[in-house]
Image (cartoon, helix red, strand yellow):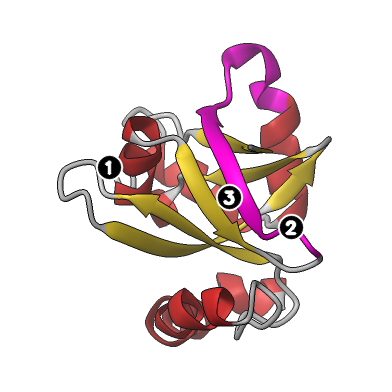
């Protein structure tokens, strides 16, 4: 599935079909069901930094120790994704994820001292992050956000 996800048709599927459905399906099933088969996907629920409205974003995640890590890659676009700005402004979030991981979490941006460990775990999960890193080289460093149970 990783090869498919990294392909043009796979990217189109995940962005245009799976994400809009998972934005509703993951919360409705407590994180148990997702269209992103074979991929560890959670739905992040956070208050919008400007709007104050609830925003939901399906994202790949990887467990690093007792935290969940999500990567603000935005598929290598020049700007950080909106959800990243939202969790910086409102770090108390709700996560809908498989395996009993749903619940309230506190988000924090991973610091330089632990970045390599988190980045390696993300890369081991999905090699597409290497491609995204190449796209952002010289423009921005891709942030990693750690989620700890509240």
Instruction: Check disc 1 and report the residue beneath it.
Output: 79
Dot 1 alpha-carbon crowd within 10 angstroms: few under 14, some 14 to 19, many 20 or more: some
Mark 1 or mark 2: which is in front? 2
Q: Decide which of tag 1 and tag 2 comes sooner along the chain.
A: 1
Q: Is residue 47 visible in the rendered structure shown here?
A: yes
Looking at the picture, tell me which residue is in the foreground, 150 or 122. 150
Q: Locate residue 23, reporting x and y percent.
A: 45, 75
First in sequence: mark 3 vs mark 1: 1
Give the magenta part as a residue range.
100-116
- The residue to which callout 3 is attached is 129
Q: Mark 2 points at which residue?
A: 101
Question: 91 or 124: which is nearer to us?
Answer: 91
Q: Where is residue 61 in the image (x, y as percent from the top left)?
A: 65, 54
- Is-magenta flag for residue 103? yes
Name the image quarter holding residue 86.
top left
> Which secondary structure lies at badge 3?
helix
Residue at 54 percent across and 81 percent down: it is 28
């Amino acid at each position: 599935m990783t090869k498919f996800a990294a392909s043009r048709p796979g990217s189109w599927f995940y962005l245009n079909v799976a994400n809009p459905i998972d934005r509703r399906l993951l919360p409705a099933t407590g994180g148990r069901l997702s269209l992103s088969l074979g991929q560890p996907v959670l739905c992040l629920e956070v208050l919008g930094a400007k709007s104050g409205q609830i925003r939901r974003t399906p994202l790949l995640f990887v467990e690093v120790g007792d935290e969940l890590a999500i990567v603000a890659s935005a598929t290598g676009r020049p700007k950080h994704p909106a959800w990243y700005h939202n969790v910086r402004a409102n770090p108390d979030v709700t996560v809908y994820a498989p395996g009993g991981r749903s619940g309230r979490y506190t988000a924090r941006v991973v610091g330089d001292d632990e970045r390599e460990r988190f980045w390696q775990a993300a890369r081991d999960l999905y090699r597409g992050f290497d491609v995204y890193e190449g796209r952002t080289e010289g423009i921005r460093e891709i942030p990693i956000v750690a989620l700890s149970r509240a």
